[in-house]
Image (spheres, rainbow, N blue to C red):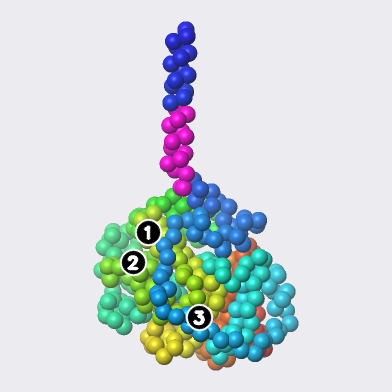
Amino acid sequence: MRNILRWLWRGALVSLLIILAAGIWKREEITRLMAVNSLFSEGRIVDNFSNMNTAFLSVPVSRGDGPVSELPYGPEAFLPNGVNTWIKERSVTALVILKKGEVVYENYFLGTTNKHRRIGWSISKSYLSALVGILLAEGKIDSLDDPVTKYAPQLKGGAYDGATLLNVLQMTSGVTFDEDYLDKNSDINRMGRVLALGREMDTFAAELTETFAAPGEGWKYVSIDTHIIGMVVRGATGRSIADLMSEKVIAPLGLEDEPYYLTDGVGTAFVLGGINMTTRDFARFGQMYLQGGMWQGQQIVPADWVTASTRPSAPTAEGEIQYGYQWWIPRDGAPGEYMARGIYGQYVYIDTAREVVIATNAADRQFRDQGVAQSNTAIFRRIAEGI
């Protein structure tokens, strides 16, 4: 009997040690998965959005060794009526306003500072659009009409077989992708778990098989389209997005702080929503676009691409906000009014005629409520008109 008990005890001890070892081995994955589950919780969202690299895999985007570009201060602008209320209601964490290239307002809220590198979420898409325009001009990508499988053969036989680079830039791939952030089993949340568990985004994208329309036949915002753009860029150049973005965009801008991308388990940048940088540096990107892709005497993004990518070319439905090549254009907007925007209230708003750039970060858990997006645009217009 004692021998049996002894062996049972030894067996239990071995099992416990195996469980503990597995827990230690998978500790990082478990930590990231827990981070995904609490990422948007009310008590943690602000801190999470300022420190994404503490919970997720990431890769730096070198700012290069050049000097910080000047972002001078101009006469301080007074915010129009209603803006301070909007800041509180929308849980704004940072607001930087440029007028004619000068900072006329800068403030930080909810415990954040000018040194926090904030997650841009889908602002990241507009950065990737800029990179595509540069590579087209350089001849690294032949044409927007090229099928994505030309550069990403892994996609052959899947949902993206037959889609062109233009289709994914305009979100007209026709691929079925559920982007409901409130449904834990949606495609967007399954994708989040791919990141958390250190798996591969390319495999996730290649395994998608369902479509709702033929490529180019209709518009639907599906974030995975942007990952396909990233696959095309990597396939066309044989280089990582982080390296390309550093060389072509980030280093020439002379940012104050080194940005970073969230990545999957093999170091592939999360291009559809993973760029992190200070709000002042988001504003620099917006100012460069306002200036037709020019920054401090250097043409960073081709001027014709700035124009083409920020005009309403996608077949969005009547009455909806319009879309270009990974940029949003208000339907009733003036020429040269467009924006990059991300979930939970991240924006880079550009009013070319008034020479105004507004960069704002937020932790707005009601960002999807009816009328919120429209009220944000209205506030940006009020600011641009009033400063």
- Looking at the rendered structure, the kind of residue marked 2 is Ser
Q: Is residue 289 above or below residue 240?
A: below
- Tell me where residue 5 appears, x and y as whole percent: 48, 13
Q: Quadrant of residue 239?
A: bottom left
At horizontal 31% and vertical 80% (from top left) the residue drawn is 136
- Tell me where residue 293 appears, x and y as whole percent: 43, 86
At horizontal 31% and vertical 83% (from top left) the residue drawn is 137
**257 or 197, nearer to the observer:** 257
Q: Which residue is mark 1?
A: 267
Q: Secondary structure at mark 1?
A: loop
Give, as a single range, the part of the protein colored magenta: 15-29
Q: Which residue is mark 2?
A: 240
Q: Is residue 22 magenta?
A: yes
Gap in Å between the C-alphas at discs 1 and 2? 9 Å
Q: Does the CB distance between marks 1 and 3 fall below 8 Å?
A: no
Q: Is residue 288 left or right of residue 105?
A: left
Q: Earlier in the sequence, mark 3 or mark 2?
A: 2
- Tell me where residue 255 appears, x and y as whole percent: 47, 77
Residue 104 visible here: yes
Q: Quadrant of residue 115?
A: bottom right
Gap in Å between the C-alphas at discs 3 and 2? 23 Å
Quick one: label 2, few (<14), some, or many (20+) residues within 10 Å? some
- Tell me where residue 285 appears, x and y as whole percent: 48, 79
Q: Is residue 186 above or below residue 298?
A: above
At horizontal 53% and vertical 68% (from top left) the residue drawn is 117
Principal secondary structure, stretch drawn in magenta: helix
Q: Which residue is mark 3?
A: 284
Q: Quadrant of residue 94?
A: bottom right
- Looking at the rendered structure, the kind of residue marked 3 is Arg
Q: Does the CB distance between marks 1 and 2 fall below 8 Å?
A: yes
Q: Earlier in the sequence, mark 1 or mark 2?
A: 2
